[in-house]
Image (tube, rainbow, N blue to C red):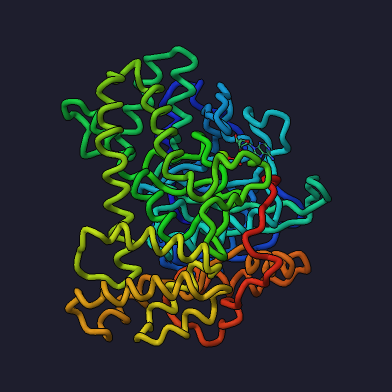
Amino acid sequence: MKFSDLKLTTPYLQNEAIFYDVLDPRPLDNPFLISVSQDAAKLLGVDEDLLDDEKLLGIVNGSLKMEGSSPFAMCYAGHQFGHFVPRLGDGRVLNLGKVNGVNLQLKGSGITLYSRGGDGRAVLRSSIREYLMSEAMHGLGIKTSRALALIGSDTDVSRQTIEKGAIVLRLASTWIRFGSFEFFNAAREPKLLQDLADYALAESFPHLVGQEDSYLKMFAEIVKSTAKTIAYWMSVGFNHGVMNTDNMSIDGSTIDYGPFAFLDDYEAYYICNHTDTAGRYSFVSQKGIGYWNLEKLARALSPILNHEASMLVLENVYYEAYDDAYLKRMRARLGLFTEDPRDMILTNQLLSSMENSSIDFNLFFRRLSSYDGNKSLILDIAVSRAPLERWLDFYDARLLKEEASQEKRHSQMLGVNPKYILKNHILQLAIDKANENDFSMVNDLLKVALSPFEEHEDLEYLCINTPQDAKNIKLSCSS
Ligand code: AMP
Ligand code: MG
């Protein structure tokens, strides 16, 4: 199947007109293709080479329409940094339609009814980041929206400086956000709220349709998948940066990549978002913010779902689901096949030792994946050896309870502890090159993003250590 031969449907448009704004994209000037993800295209059932598809560029630029497509922006609300905004919506995104259970979106395709004074554009810098990160999170086994293609252009876009406009073609099984429900609750439209809930059930939870207490069951699944995704973020050192309720997908996928970061040296209170002065979305806050956001969702659903019942589900399910997922993941990262009741303590001790030792989070785990009792290999990359050295003694003692051979442990660990992590300094190098019209690094990063655990001998330059002055930097929200 060829991408441009796909036939889309637009079931969302069967909802009332207040749900969306139907309009055409505004194409960029002199567009050119920068990168495609053939892996993401598989989700759509596309097996022909995207690069051979002469219509792809026009479709991503919005100058060509796919069969069945009727572009629309979605309306939603959201809590931004704790404050409720009753109307947000896709201000620079257009949904093209759906195929194979996947919704296609253009990000950066011009203003919509919901642009609120914004220009509807996305700059090349932030588009490269979102494009690569979507694929990298998938490569790491974390639920995420995907990215099929990235295009650049000559269109000027004004931010702190003049930059160039770009568009990412994003894919997700749903684009309904916690904030979508908040919109209809705040608008005091219980019938439309129910329509949205029914749409969400059919789209993301079809196994619950027609069941008793289907909204409560749907909420429980949202709680569970949100907890699991955030636990995975924490296990891999990912800081989302803008966990507003409008950036929370109801299927637990990571969406809306802005000033995100992977930790360099482990730092619990790291804040990647420059505008987040209070640290609301700091690395260690993410678990609590996930809960806070789900409380807002429960509140938004209250006209159609008993609030006490949903809060009970939230309390009973969230922390347990989080801890289960987190511990499972951390045991895998530590090469522990058995379960010991003290493993959470061992993990927490590791994090404080790492912080005191100043060591790169993911590089530590990669080195630990070939640990044979020789501590130097690991301690040599720490600024201060003593805290981590003590922890390795605890680890040695814990390994004595394991029956698996060292060889088996190492090979398992190498499959879960990535060699390649798209840290901000490396993304920035790719962006610097792209600004000089060299997109080779974007395409190299895509390769390692999709297989981060494998060795790529010709791409070793992509796993260089972060320079001291680029470690755990903060990023601007402007995108
Ligand atoms: P974000 O923080 O990127 O998730 O965006 C928050 C809200 O602002 C969403 O409703 C976006 O659609 C909107 N937005 C962000 N940037 C722009 C832009 N350049 N033009 C129009 N709307 C925007
Ligand atoms: Mg957003």
The foreground one among 159 and 32 is 159
Outermost top residue: 188
Look at the picture and state if 455 lies above or below 98: below
- Residue 444's image quarter? bottom right
Q: Picture coordinates of residue 264 (x, y %)?
A: 57, 65
Quadrant holding the N terminus = bottom left
Look at the picture and state if 277 lies above or below 380: above
Split into quadrants, the picture shows ligand 1 in the one at: top right
Residue 185 horizontal side relative to residue 261, left or right: left
Outermost right residue: 161
- Using the rendered image of the protein, determine whether residue 41 is visible from the camera's viewpoint: no
Q: Picture coordinates of residue 194 (x, y %)?
A: 34, 21
Q: Residue at x 67, y 45 (%)?
A: 477
- Using the rendered image of the protein, determine whether residue 182 is visible from the camera's viewpoint: yes
- Residue 413's image quarter? bottom left
Residue 236 horizontal side relative to residue 213, left or right: right
Look at the picture and state if 319 lies above or below 409: above
Q: Residue at x 35, y 45 (%)?
A: 227
Q: Residue at x 52, y 29 (%)?
A: 78
